[in-house]
Amino acid sequence: MTGAGGVGKTTLAANLGYEVARKGYQVAIFDLDPQGSLNVACRLSKTPAPKATTAWIYSGFFDGTYTLTPVWEKHVKKLEIYPGGSALFKVMPNLVQAGGSRLLQEALTEHPLPHDLIIFDCPATLEQIPKTALAAATHLLVPLVPDPKAIDGTRVLLDWYMSSVSELNLSPPPPFLGFVINNLEDGAEHQRLAKEIRPRYEARGYRVFSAIKHYTAFTNAWSEGIPLRVHRSTHPALAPLEEIAKAVIQEIQGGTSGSKKSARR
Ligand SMILES: Nc1ncnc2c1ncn2[C@@H]1O[C@H](COP(=O)(O)OP(=O)(O)OP(=O)(O)O)[C@@H](O)[C@H]1O
Ligand SMILES: [Mg+2]
């Protein structure tokens, strides 16, 4: 999640899901965005029936039926997508009612999935849906782009995190797995901002993963509906993606601090 749009949440969710799945782990990605971009990134139907989307979880009628569709099966065995889409707009009123923020967490507690990792791909705004993800998550992963607006946006995210954690009474609150600077360009301004971000976050005890540079290969892979590794198996952006996947796998295996089994976004 982030407090900003177009910073690479969906790109990261899809590619990270793929990287973890190719190591043999069972992965599901929940698209919690009314835009349903993940459907496009994975070449699924653009307009799934409301009951076949994550909106079903918030509908008040959820019966444990998660409509998970396997993707990229030719390349990886255990990666499934739970589509988002505009049906999420219709269930928004349910989320502001008492207990609405807990619906996703309750669904997964009452109807557990066998997956090693569930990734929640959140919409850009920090409203009700990300709050449900926060309540259900074991870890948070935050992509940010190196521009002053995004850095401000992250301050807003941290404020939102603190107040939501206390409102939801999350104890312990899900920790940040880390921050990822994405879309880093070679220009002097980007390099300066990236240099500034790292010590600032590390000083507050947050992990900052190796930056992911701007590469047209990401957009090309997206338009082909495939992950970056399938698009180009030796692409340099696979190294930072693998670094994040390693951190996730470490948490799946028990974590550095003995945290819960699944690591979620
Ligand atoms: N490192 C990168 N280099 C080049 N293009 C990138 C990179 N990361 C993401 N993109 C492109 O930027 C666009 C936005 O990315 P993406 O949809 O993942 O962002 P998002 O944060 O999920 O957006 P939204 O807030 O709309 O959900 C996409 O076209 C994607 O291909
Ligand atoms: Mg997105």
Image: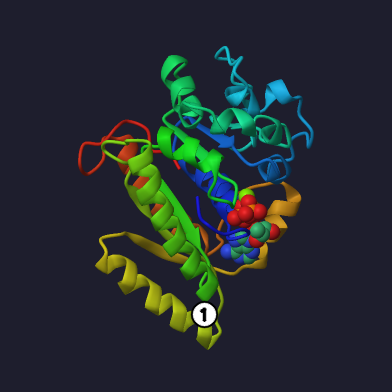
Residue holding disc 1: 190
Q: Which colour scheme is used?
A: rainbow
* Picture residue at 67% right of the left edge, 66% below the top: 216
Q: Quadrant of the C terminus?
A: top left
Residue furthest out toward the left: 257
Local crowd size for mark 1, using a 10 Å CA cut-off: few (<14), some (14–19), many (≥20): some
> Relative to residue 142, is residue 227 drawn left or right?
right
Element class at badge 1: helix
**Residue under the point 59% across and 69% down:** 214
Q: Could you say which is closer to the camera, residue 177 or residue 99?
A: 99
Q: Nearer the viewer, residue 113 or 76?
A: 113
Q: How many marks?
A: 1
Query: In this orientation, does residue 30 appear?
Result: yes
The x, y position of residue 111, in whole percent, is 47, 15
Q: Residue 76: x and y, percent?
A: 57, 35
* Percent coordinates x, y for residue 96 in the rendering: 55, 33
Please state the quadrant of the image where ligand 1 appears: bottom right
Q: Is residue 249 visible?
A: no
Q: Residue at x 61, y 14 (%)?
A: 61
Question: Would residue 265 appear left or right of 49 to someone viewing this image?
Answer: left
Residue 63 placement, left or right of 168: right
Of all residues shown, which one is farthest toward the top? 63
| Kind of residue at badge 1 | His
Say if 207 sits above or below 84 in the image. below
Location of residue 197 (image quadrant): bottom left
Q: Where is residue 101 in the image (x, y as percent from the top left)?
A: 48, 32
Label 1 CB less than 8 angstroms from ligand 1: no
On the image, which quarter does residue 196 sit in? bottom left
Q: Residue at x 43, y 40 (%)?
A: 134
Pick whichever, 209 or 72, lies toward us. 209
